[in-house]
Structure formats: C-alpha cells, structure tokens
Amino acid sequence: MEYRFEHPDEFRAFVRDRKSRKPFDKICTAKEAVSRFVADGDYIVYDFSSLTRGPQSLIREVIRQKKKDLWIGAEFTLHESALLTGAGCATRIDVGFLGYGNYIGQAVCDGRVKVYEWTNGGLALRILAGARGVPFLPTRDLLGSDNLSVSAAKVIPDPYTGLPVCLVPALNPDVAFLHVHQADIHGDARIFGTNLFALEAALASRRVIVSAEEIVEPDEFRKDPMRTTIPYFLVDAVVHAPFGAYPGAMPARYEIDLEHVDRLNGIRNDDQMRKYLDENIYSVADHEEFLDKRVGARRMKELRRKASITEGYR
Amino acid sequence: MEYRFEHPDEFRAFVRDRKSRKPFDKICTAKEAVSRFVADGDYIVYDFSSLTRGPQSLIREVIRQKKKDLWIGAEFTLHESALLTGAGCATRIDVGFLGYGNYIGQAVCDGRVKVYEWTNGGLALRILAGARGVPFLPTRDLLGSDNLSVSAAKVIPDPYTGLPVCLVPALNPDVAFLHVHQADIHGDARIFGTNLFALEAALASRRVIVSAEEIVEPDEFRKDPMRTTIPYFLVDAVVHAPFGAYPGAMPARYEIDLEHVDRLNGIRNDDQMRKYLDENIYSVADHEEFLDKRVGARRMKELRRKASITEGYR
Amino acid sequence: MPRKVEFTDTEFMIAQGARLLEDGKTFFVGWGIPQIVAILEQKLYVPNVEQLFECGAVGPQSVLPFVRGTMGGPQNTYRSLQWLNMNWAFSYSASGYMDYGMLGALQVDPYGNINSTYLGGTFEKPERRFAGSGGGNQVASHCWRTVVIIKHEGRRFVPKVEFITSPGYLTGPGAREKAGLPKDTGPYRVVTSKALFGFDERTKEMTLLSVLRGITPEEVVKEMAFRPRIAETVTEIHPPTEDELRLLREEIDPSRIIIRGEKMTAIA
Amino acid sequence: MPRKVEFTDTEFMIAQGARLLEDGKTFFVGWGIPQIVAILEQKLYVPNVEQLFECGAVGPQSVLPFVRGTMGGPQNTYRSLQWLNMNWAFSYSASGYMDYGMLGALQVDPYGNINSTYLGGTFEKPERRFAGSGGGNQVASHCWRTVVIIKHEGRRFVPKVEFITSPGYLTGPGAREKAGLPKDTGPYRVVTSKALFGFDERTKEMTLLSVLRGITPEEVVKEMAFRPRIAETVTEIHPPTEDELRLLREEIDPSRIIIRGEKMTAIA
C-alpha cells in the first residue's frame, strides 16, 4: 500500500543543510510563502480542522497558485480536501476524518482522489514518529481492523511480551501549515487552546509556514517560555493573516461563519465547485482582497463579537 | 539483565479497578500518603532533581518510615539515592545521572546497591512508553554503547528501513512522587518551568503522590486549562508541603540552601550518614518539625528572598 | 393515566445513551451525537463524569446551547481540566483511564464491529464513501466499554460489515486479544432508535436486551439483516422523560439541528 | 613585547571550547563546564547560538554570575524560547536540529568513545563509580558534531575505554552507521587542557590538531596512553585572551568555583 516515507537520515540531512537556525525576518505574503515553499507533488500537513484554527487562507493560496499532485495529511478535513480536490490540486489524502459534504465522497468513488486510511490516532502517531526521528512508533490500536489491512502499518510481536503490536511508519511531510494566535517575525509562535500535533508537525516537516492572527515582539516569547508552541528555528515563513482561519473559527478571536460554511457544505458537483472557487479564490488576488470583497468588515466585526469565550486562551 | 516491567494489560486493569475518577478530598499528611501508598519492594519514580523541584520532603518521609528494598528510577539523583541507600531503603537504582558525592559511588562499589544504566533519555522514554500503554518505544540512541549491553534494551531491524533500532521496555512504576507549585484538594496540579516527565510519570505510575507548595481552589484549573500539568484523576494523595523541595530549590519560590547541600555532599561514610539521618530525619516527627527545628524561619525567609527570578513561572 | 409522548428517533437515542453511564467514570466522547449524550447525562444523571475529546480536551464542560461542528472550539472545550493534544488524548485512553467510549456507525455486525468508511464496491472503488475512522478506531480499541449509537434501520445491521473501521469482537471470543488489542475491552451496548443491545458474555454476539415501550422484540429483529440473540427477559425502555426532552429542546439544542429526526410516539 | 598570562587549566579548556562553535548554530549543552563554555561563546563570539538543555529548556540565556548545580533552575533556563520536557528535548536532537553537543568525560579513546560510568573492576563490581551517562549518550548519538572536554591527564586517554557510555566512532569507520546511529554524526573535537584534537576523516582516529603555545606536540602525546595521529601541520593555540579571562572571572564565575584548577602560564 502506497505511503509517504522518508528515511530518518535523509530528513536529518535536510534539517542540517536547509533549515536556518538564525533568527531573521521571515515575514512574507501568503503568495510568497506558498510559491517559495510549496512545490507540485508535495506532501502537506496542517493542524486542526476546517472549522477550528485551520490554515484556510494558506489553503486558498495553494489553490490560487494551482499547485498540482499534492498529497495531504488531514485529521479533520471537512472542506479543504473537497476544495483542493475540486481545484485539481490534491490527488491523494491521508485521513483522518474525511468529513462531510457529498463532493469529496463522490470524488473518492470516481477515483479522482485516492484516500488512505490511517485513522486520527495513527496519523498523529506517524507525525510524532517523524518529530522524534525514529522510523516508526508502536500502538495498540488499528489491530484487527481493516484500516490496518489497507495501510502500510505493520504488526510485529512485541519482544517483551510476545503481544502483537502495530507499528506505524514515521511521516515527514514536505510542508506543514500552522495557523496560530501569535507569532513574531522570526517564527516563534503561540497557539492557545488544544492542538492536534502542532509541535510534532513543525519538527517533522521539511518546511513550516506559520500564518498568524497577530504579530508580536520576539521578546514576548522569552518572557513566557511555557506558552511557546513553536520556536522560530523550525519555521521558514511567517504570514500575517488576520481571519486566516475563516470561514472556520479562531478560538477566542472570532467564530465560524456558518452561512459561508453552509455554502461550502452545499457543493455537490463540479459546476457548484467551479463557481465557489471562482468567486472566493480565483477572482480575488489574495486573502486581503477576499476579506474586503467577499467577507466584509461588518461580517468580521460580527464574528469577532460572537467569540465571547476567552477564558483560558492566553 | 534485571528490569522492571509490567504487562500493559495488567497496568490497565489496575487503572480500571483501583484508580478513582471521582474528585474527592485527597489532602493528607506526608506520613499518611507514604504509609498508605508506598510499600516495601516498590518501584518509585520522581520528577526533576535533588536541587530543582525534587520531592525531598516525601523522600525524607520514606526514610523516616524505614521502607525497605525500594527500587528507584532517577534522572538526576544527587542526594536522594545516597540517603535512601544509606538509610537502608533502596537496593536498586535505575539511572540517569548518579551524581555526586563519594557515598553513593562507594555503595555501588561495595555492592550495597545495584545500579542499572538506562541513560536519561532511555529512562524518560521508558516512562513515556508506560504512559502511552505500549510495551516499548524505539529510539536511535543507546545503540553501539555499553549502556545497551548492560540494560534490557533490545535491538531489532526496523521493518521500514532495515536500520537497527533500539527498543526500550515500558516502565510503569508503583509510585510517582511529584512536587508541584500548586495543587487543589482533588489532585489537579501545576508545575511552572521545565519538567522531566511529570505527566508521563503520573500516567505511567500505579500511585501518584503530589506534594504542593500551595493549595489552590479547584476552579482555578478549569479557568486556565493550558496550565494544568496533571489532572486530578491520576492522583492518589495531595500533601501540602511548603519548602517540600528543600534543601533544593523551587523555581521562582525559593533558592537552594547551598550550606545544607554542602553538608550532604560531604557525607563520605556510614558514621556521617547516620549522623545526618538522625539529625535531619529520624529525630524530627515530620516535615513541619524539620522546618521549624532544623531550618528555621529566618533561613526560609532568606531563601525565598533569593528566588528573585519569577518571569515565566506562572 | 397514560400519556402519549412525542419525540424524535434521535432524541430517544440520546436519552437512552445518557441513562447508560455510571457516575464517577470517564467518557471518551466521539464527534456529534455522543457530545449531546455526554452533556445530557452529566446535567441529569451523572455529574461526576469527566469527558475526553480526541483533540486534547480533558474534562470539558460544554456551554449551552450546544454549538455543532466545532468540537475543538471554546464552547465545547469550555472549562476543561486540561488542554493538551491528540497524542496525549490517546495516551489517556491507551493507558486504561477511559471507561466508556461512544461512537456513531454506518453499519454494525453481530460482533459489534463498526463500519463508518464506505458502503458498496471495494475500498479502492467504493459506491459510497463516508468520513471513516477519525479517532473512532482508537476509542473502540482502548476504552473499557464502547457504546455504539446507530439508527434502527435494516441496512445498518449486517451479518458482516463491509469494512471494519473500529473493532468490535472481530470474529468472536478471544479474537480481540489475539489481534493484540487491550484485554477485556470491546463493545458494551448498541443503542438504537428502537432498542438496546448488549453482547453475550460467552459468545460475544449482539443480544437484544430491551425495546422501546410499545414495540415488540419481533418488530425490532425483523428489521435487521441478521438475527441477534435475544435475552431471556427483554425489558422495556421508557421513552424520553420530560426532563430529558426539556433539557434537550430548551437548553441543549433549542434550534433542533441535532435532535431533529423521524417522529415517534410512545406511552410515558 | 611578549607578556606572560596566568590561567587555570579549566579556564583554558573553556576558552578553547568557546572558540570552536559557529554562529547561527544550535548547541546541546551538557551539565557543568559545557554550560560555562556556552555562556562565554555567546557573550564573546557567536551571539546567535541557541542552546538546548536536556531538561527541556530551548534557547536559554543564563543570568550571570553563573549559578552552579541547578541546570533546571530559573537562573540557567532564564529567557528561554520554550520550556518543555525531556522527551521533547531529545526530539529536537533526534530529528537533526542540534548541530553541536558538548560533553565532559572520565576517559576517551582513539575513536572518541566516552566513558563516564566507572573505572576499574567490572560494571557490576566497579572500583570507582561515577555519574554515568545522564543525557550524554543521547547528545553523542544525535548531535551532528560532538565536542568532548577533558583534562589532559594520561590516565584519561586510553586505547580502549572500559565502558562506552556515549558513543564515539566505536570500532572505526562505518561502525556508528552499522550500529544504527544517525548518519554523519560523531565526535568532532576533543578539547583538553593542553591541546585540541580532531578525527581523521578516513580512519576516524583521534588526531592532534593544535597545542597550547609553548607546549610541543611530543609533550602532549607522551602523556597519553595511546598515540594519536598527528596532523601534518600542528597549529598553536593562543592562551585565554584578556576578554575571555575577564568575562570568566568577573562576570561569569566571580567566586571561581568552576574555573579554578591547576595553574598554567603561557605567552600571550
């Protein structure tokens, strides 16, 4: 069964040779970040879901740039798998939870996109393995299920107990997209609330693009090291992207735009898909123009106001 | 090579049957906690070192209660391994870093205590395996070294690359001691600053004794979930222990008592050991009497004053 | 005097689910309906239950009304004990700390195996494709007792699921252990819109335990594509109580986006 | 006009260590003397170096004067970029993010294998027992370039270490890779109180590169229990500079608890 895998020594060599440890100004536009760090054929992973802190502005930029033959690793992929498939960008998806809407389901049935089942736990564990520099990690799930038989997971007898144990191969994506609450110009980043595998993905991926609601001073991070989610030297590009998770929510910053989400959920065929892509992505130059022309200040103000729960998000 | 190991299914059954998920008042004295939850022959693990946030008041209580045949898992064991060995409590130590002073070194040479080498990384990984409910975890260190040959770590060919990979067996201690900045009566606990494997040890151990500098309201934890280190249902006993890390430091609370530490470092033979134990442990009824009669309010005030760096510890 | 209650099939499943759990236990909550079950049970029956979400929320206490869709958002992870990440969430379950897990399903078979991946065709070329496991596989593998919630429709109860997304008892007694899954785990109950099933202790086969007041065991069984075992005494399940319905309709889901469904009636 | 400098062997080792590293690199810092090296180098030569401590401090910038003993305390982990834990710290190194590692040693052999566990007797019944690996094994396994700091005493340079606590090139070329250790890693330099060694690219044997001004290669070699390779041109190491000594003595360790040692002199 086809699976993405990189020898840990090759990944390490990339990290040694191609990741700068210097704190320099990495601020750029989404356009620059995506054109520089995402290539056709890449494997992309991202943190959280379409509805919660997903890197939606970066996903839209990938579509705008018409990247091809992408393989995405997605835990909770609700809309971006459909959009990336509909736009002809993604041809393979590792899941996760391939949620909802008929479009993506039909695309799988039609063979327009291949889906590989790893389960949420399996995918998170693969990324942890990639972050820990080991070729695999063991787990006591997947066992006995058909997810096991359609994946590249393997079963070995545990040398300590004789128990059958499932091994999942490490995953080292080409690119990780992380949408965060705060970042500095070097790439230090903070996420508030839960995350799926933010630090794991940053450590495991060759390239890391951070998009941030807010840019703060580098000194902030050194004053409060317990709150740092990602240190700068894992990061390649920092995009300042207020409302970057739109139409999803950014916890404690703005709420979901349910109306827009319903429009996404309603996409059932290629005509509707093309219409959505044209209107929301191709016809606008960038995220800022999208916000101005397709969302609008009034709507954004309203979504901000709805985000009334801030306790714990700091 | 002898090693502590419990079948993951046995550990799980203990967790199912013997760990309460109810939030009840677990406040008790160190005397009660140790007599109830530490038995002769137990394997004990604890977080951090003799000099930084070590559970020193609990260690002294173990000595006071003359527990026997203990096996301790210690990353940075500077003094407690010597004290526990000198007092006849510990007979086996998994390290880690077996620091310093001549007493413990001589005890190893004399065969009074057996030391097993796992290295800091190996021990932390064993505890992570115990916390993740898997019988082992893989790593790309220990390989080629003699630590490998004197431990129960095993080498297998990685089924994905063929690379030799080292596996360390899970560690599920009988008891974990965690000295924390804040806890509530149910056992929710916060540590500020780095930790070695606090949550790992709490999840991996059958019994968890938390000693806390400060007792706070349970509601505090739900208001700030990112700061919770350990949730209550992993914890069996909560001991209110101001200066519980003494003579070591509690980050941002009080500094090391270097004078007392030098006295500990100076112990070179059994006479000196007996004298130290008599004076500081056997001759006082508990931690509070120790603080009153052997440390004193003036000294404590001074050590508190020295802890001038508080940035980030909250 | 007997009184007729009206409710939806979804409301009935949620109410049943909420009555199942014990106080002082932990509950690994799947996406969607299980979230509503967890809220209702905690409000009404078992205040001391800690929930776990796979996104890393330990002990969340959702705000009401329930906000659909965003399990990881501030409303659903409100007042958690701890916010972590996914690998930690599954450590809690893998090490034995999760008593109950609750999952939806497309299909279930006599051994409680769950399919939520596809229907018809093959895995590579399915006729209909669905969301798949999410974290369901881990929940069904790690939790001590897994509860399945599924609408009582014939096509959903099949002799053999087309794809085992989340493991039940697999091929029967001992099969989970042989596969390496944690000992003494497995499906505990199947909650449907008409009945409640357990699993025979010896054979591990699905067993009809109770039916909704006013429905006969035969009516329940004839809609299934396999014949379940039937308990010696099949008990009666009372329809949703006034408290259950009031909470669901007024506090938890006033816009009725989740609790809507097929209308049903029964004698209260 | 030549001027005589006085310094201790420890001061010389620290100064040498501090001159070795490149700017813009990461540095996995072992307990004790490597901490002082890291502080001195960052103050004087390479401001953009991020340190890592195994206790989970990423990018710490210690306060001065240096506080001995407590690597995990607020003084030494001050102004870190991130505070994590040990398993995360070793993930940074295992995934290839740590350029340099620095470790002390009891004994070292021609392949740069390090013993810090025991001397004499057997592992089970040693004559003298020391601290052992700590995280040294991981540092020497994961970092791209490991630097060993060791006092120049004959008994410390042995043909074969009694116990490999932290791996050097093991038995020679290819042995690390064969054992499964990450590719292209290994000992880079051995800093002593008299000299500096590297490792031959082909044979992986320890090679004398430089000696302290005023000492001959022969004097250095005759104190060792094995004969190292000797570089075609052995260069001269200048003694601690005024800046180095001032920083060490006035700012970093004014109580001279760490920098004390055997007195040495050389021509500045």
Image: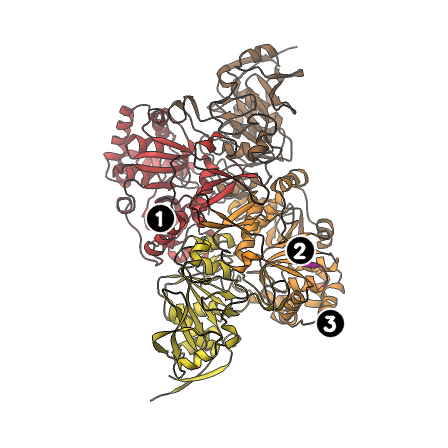
Chain colours: A orange, B red, C yellow, D brown
x%, y% of residue D104? 51, 26
Residue A89, magenta (yes or no): yes
Image quarter where the N terminus of chain B lies is top left
Residue C69 visible, this orientation: yes
User: Of marks 3 and 2, which one's residue comes earlier in the chain?
Assistant: 2
Q: Is residue C77 left or right of residue A95?
A: left
Q: Is residue D217 above or below residue B148?
A: above
Residue A269 picture quarter: bottom right
Residue lying furthest bottom: C1
Residue A271, numbered circle: 3
Magenta region: A87-92
Residue C245 picture quarter: bottom left
Return the residue nearer the eye: A195 or C126.
C126
Residue D79 visible, this orientation: no
> Closer to the observer: label 1 or label 2?
2
Amino acid found under the numbered disc labelled 2: Trp
Spatial CA distance of label 1 from label 2 is 42 Å
Q: Helix or strand or loop: what does disc 2 sit on?
A: strand
Label 3 resides on the chain identified as: A
Label 1 resides on the chain identified as: B
Amino acid found under the numbered disc labelled 3: Asp
Residue pointed to by mark 2: A71
